[in-house]
Image: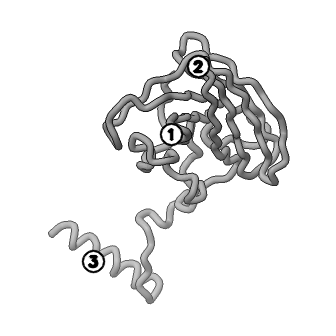
Amino acid sequence: MQKTLLISMTLSFSMLQTGRLEAAPPFAGDPNADRLPPKPESRAWNHKTSGLVVSFLFEPGVPDPNQVTTLTIVPSEPVGGTGLVGRTRPLEGADIVVTVKDPSGKKLGRYRAHPNPLSKAKYGLHYTPAVRGVHTVEVEGKLPNGKTFLAEAALPVDVWPLPAELEGTGDKVQGAGIKRPLSGPVSK
């Protein structure tokens, strides 16, 4: 009863002020009502390729131009289960080279990803994008057993909110297609 009364009072007040019914969000008079939520602290993306899963972690999730960005790459292989209950095993000893392209597709550089100390099978590098737009991060990897893999992810630089194709966490790997918050504490 109280909710119904409050809604009808709000609609009546809105109609009195403007003379027409408007679907204004709550607190529409707030000077910050049109502001977007903050850019995410981190953004995860998963790419399934040749029987492997390559996970990317970008920190910050949507960097600004000239902001140092940490890229963490984790190659792993599925070890059972499917969908939300699937599990993977990180692969150690990989040799990983990362190629970064600007929004026009021009190759900006090739970098060797270094193993992260004290982190099992995590590889990383720092990259500072210079221009706004969606950059492409391509990964070429070789495992100790000789198997090679390729993966790629998009790095949106000062592109916020994200375009629909970059929402979520990538391929439908272990529930990766589920849309969930992109920001929050980052486990290292």
Mark 1: amino acid:
Ser
Q: Element at badge 1?
A: loop
Q: Nearer the viewer, residue 158 or 74?
A: 74
> What x and y, as percent, mark residue 102?
79, 47
**153 to 149, vertically: above or below:** below
Say which residue label 3 marks: 8
| Left or right: 90, with 93 as reference point | left
**Residue in view at x 63 percent, y 30 percent:** 148
Q: Residue furthest top?
A: 118
Q: How many marks?
A: 3
Mark 3: amino acid:
Ser
> What x and y, as percent, mark residue 169?
50, 45
> Label 2 vs label 3: CA separation?
68 Å
* Residue mark closest to the camera, 1 vs 2: 2
| Left or right: 99, with 4 as reference point | right
Q: Element at badge 3?
A: helix
> Label 1 vs label 2: CA separation?
36 Å
**40 to 144, vertically: above or below:** below
Local crowd size for mark 3, using a 10 Å CA cut-off: few (<14), some (14–19), many (≥20): few
Contact between marks 1 and 2 (CB within 8 A): the answer is: no
Say which residue label 2 marks: 145
Q: Residue furthest front?
A: 146
Disc 1 or 2, which lies upstream in sequence? 2
Local crowd size for mark 2, using a 10 Å CA cut-off: few (<14), some (14–19), many (≥20): few
Q: Which mark is residue 183?
A: 1
Mark 2: amino acid:
Asn
Q: Element at badge 2?
A: loop
> What x and y, as percent, mark residue 164?
55, 59
Disc 3 or 1, which lies upstream in sequence? 3
* Residue mark closest to the camera, 2 vs 3: 2
**Coloured how?**
one colour
